[in-house]
Amino acid sequence: MLVTGASGFIGHHVATELLRRGAAVTVAVRDPARLPAVLAGGNARVLQVDGMRPGALAESIRAVRPACVFHLAGYGVAKHERDETAMQRLNADLLAELVDVLATDEHTDWPGLRLVHAGSAFEYGTLSEPLDESVQPQPFTPYGKSKLAGSEIVHRAVREHRLPALVLRPFTVFGHGERSGRLFPTLLAARDRDDPVPLSTGEQQRDFVLVQDVASAFVDLALADASAVVQRQGPFDRSTINLASGRLHRVRDFALAAADALGIARQRLQFGAIAQLPEEMPHLPVPVTRLRQALGHPLPGDLPVLLARAVAGSASRV
């Protein structure tokens, strides 16, 4: 198994989950120094790959010949990642190179997927309807547009080359290893202080999912019979699956539940003290019918249970 972006938030959890299940794992990353210890300590083969250099990732795939590629490398999630040329290169053009290699390198004895690509909920954009996978997305940010361009490359490969591949769109993922400045790490850091915690109003609704559950879903779907999970009908070949719980919660309710789990006094949470980010995407409920069909169930969505697991997971890695 080859994992790109394994130094990132979801990527390192996917690589770790694969190792836990006994897979031979190769990770392709731009900066090996950023890898977590479980991956840098010899458990995984590490390749240094500069995705901005045309052909670099294709060379690595030809050298490794993985049964499946988990493509989690990307650009544009962090606030400082705003170079639109890099977004186009790393979120879209890189996919074209990747699928070209996989489409010409068959693994006839491998029944699972050849490619599991991490799309983004931002691909849906400004839709004012439930975010079903078959709807026409309307991304409004450069990041969302570049991620949709990458997903469309995967869809074409499914249709034209019959590549066994899926685009998985995780929704509001949180947990250990999440980038600082986001809600859960902010509350986690506030646990050891007693000052106020400035937050937005928190009225926006999100489908919160725990990163370990997302990583497990990536692996479970990759190992499933490709003919059962990749459906090639419809405008997007139905090769996209939402990774969500199907349950919406206000950000305010998440923050309150997290404060309870972390032992933070609720009165310290100052809702409305900071403005909501302009790129925040309001959305209606997230359908999980396709996920239920492919996996047998949606991702867990009970906030107190998820937060108890997140707090325990973060404590075990301190």
Image: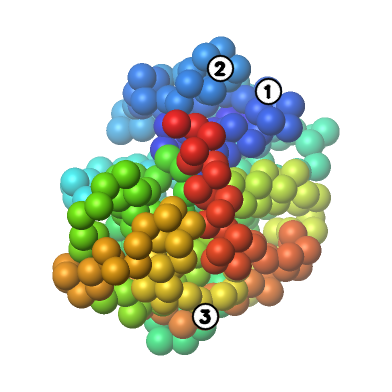
The answer to whether residue 169 is seen in the rendering is no
Q: Is residue 176 visible?
A: yes
The numbered disc on residue 24 is: 1
- Residue identified by numbered label 2: 45
Crowding near the residue tagged with mark 1, few <14, some 14–19, many ≥20 C-alpha atoms within 10 Å: some
Q: Amino acid at mark 2?
A: Arg
Mark 3: secondary structure = loop
The local crowd at label 2, few if under 14, some if 14 to 19, many if 20 or more residues have their Cα within 10 Å, is some
Q: Quadrant of the C terminus?
A: top left
The Cα atoms of the two marked residues, 3 and 1, are separated by 37 Å
Q: Earlier in the sequence, mark 2 or mark 3?
A: 2
Residue name at image x 27 percent, y 64 percent: 268
Q: Assess whether mark 1 and mark 3 are in contact (beta carbons under 8 angstroms).
A: no
Query: Between disc 2 and disc 1, whose residue precedes?
Result: 1
Q: Are marks 2 and 1 in contact (CB under 8 Å)?
A: yes
Residue 159 image position (x, y, % from top left): 62, 59
| Disc assigned to residue 285 | 3
The residue located at (37%, 73%) in the rendering is 252
Q: Estimate the spatial distance between the alpha carbons at disc 2 and disc 1, rounded to whole Å.
A: 8 Å
